[in-house]
Image (cartoon, rainbow, N blue to C red):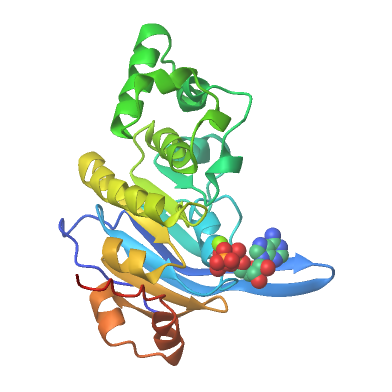
Amino acid sequence: MSSPVTMPSPDAGRPPLLEATGLTKVFLSGGKSFKAVDDVSLRIPQGGVLGIVGESGSGKSTVARLVMRLIEPTAGRILLDGEDLSAMSGEPLRLVRRHMQIVFQNPHSALNPRHTIRDAIAEPFLVQTQLRGIELERRVDGLLDIVSLPKAFKYRYPHELSGGQKQRICIARAVALEPRLLVLDEPTSALDVSVQAQIITFLQELRERLNLTYLFISHNLAVVRYLCDHVIVMNRGRMVEEGPTDAVFANPSEDYTRKLIASIPRLPQRAQT
Ligand SMILES: Nc1ncnc2c1ncn2[C@@H]1O[C@H](COP(=O)(O)OP(=O)(O)OP(=O)(O)O)[C@@H](O)[C@H]1O
Ligand SMILES: [Mg+2]
């Protein structure tokens, strides 16, 4: 079994916030089986940021969905703050889900076009809590403030927002119930480059402000380098490399990783005037 990524923990003695060992997922379709994730192990301490990189189809989103228990693992264990999620179902799983949220790639399809922004942000409270009335409105306002959007946006519909603004709403909704783990699956790849940079800076600030832990999935190695302490490189469902981000980027041990790094687009230097 592959060894889990070990990150120095600021609070030694406490279990890592997330620990997954031997995660494996076999999909069955059309009478054939396909191993999309093969023996992946990872560990993220409270407050850490772990990146997963790898080319399209390498199994990154499947790992995210396994960690969130959106799909059942074929094998492996998932512990959140020491609590085993692998065998959980029903009400206990619903309660534990409050502590982990996922933000997907495409904010355009993540929001219901017929719901106002207020309704989108209020939904987690209505589903999971007893909070109502003026207190609920205050929380919605507070979340808009956290994602740096004006309160007046409450009465808008998703089509009246830009892509970056919509992704901020998705993030507001994901952090509404104060989760401990945020899984970000290519949260900026549907956005313009300039907006991507804004969201990444914002995610960095948000993590510090809300004491969040991130599992961050991206094609974009430049972004991973900026945001993540540790990184896992995946190829065909397997972890081919892992370690502190700086070390992996400075001295990749795998050819596959070297090729990924070499494929980071370099922007032309602006001419000095
Ligand atoms: N429900 C499913 N049934 C069958 N195969 C699946 C299913 N979901 C994913 N796969 C396959 O598993 C592999 C990994 O998919 P996954 O979405 O995890 O890749 P990824 O690394 O996130 O790719 P991308 O960077 O394009 O998002 C792919 O070959 C995909 O076709
Ligand atoms: Mg994916």
Residue 20 visible? The answer is: yes
Total residue callouts: 0
Vertical arrangement, residue 181 with respect to residue 29, above or below: above
Q: Position of residue 261 (x, y in %)?
A: 39, 81
- Which quadrant of the rendered structure holds the N terminus? bottom left
Given residues 138 and 11, the one toward you in this image is 138
Which residue is situated farthest in the right direction here? 30
The answer to whether 132 appears left or right of 73 in the picture is: left
Given residues 97 and 124, the one toward you in this image is 124
The answer to whether 232 appears left or right of 162 in the picture is: left
Quadrant in the rendering for residue 265: bottom left
Q: Position of residue 116 (x, y in %)?
A: 54, 22
Q: Position of residue 59 (x, y in %)?
A: 56, 69
Residue 26 visible? The answer is: no
Which residue is depicted at the point 42% across and 67% down? 220
Given residues 128 and 87, the one toward you in this image is 128
Which residue is situated farthest in the top direction here? 133
Vertical arrangement, residue 124 with respect to residue 271, above or below: above
Which residue is depicted at the point 24% across and 76% down? 246
Which residue is depicted at the point 38% across and 57% down? 215
Vertical arrangement, residue 34 with respect to residue 89, above or below: below
Quadrant of ligand 2 in image: bottom right
Which residue is depicted at the point 50% across and 51% down? 68
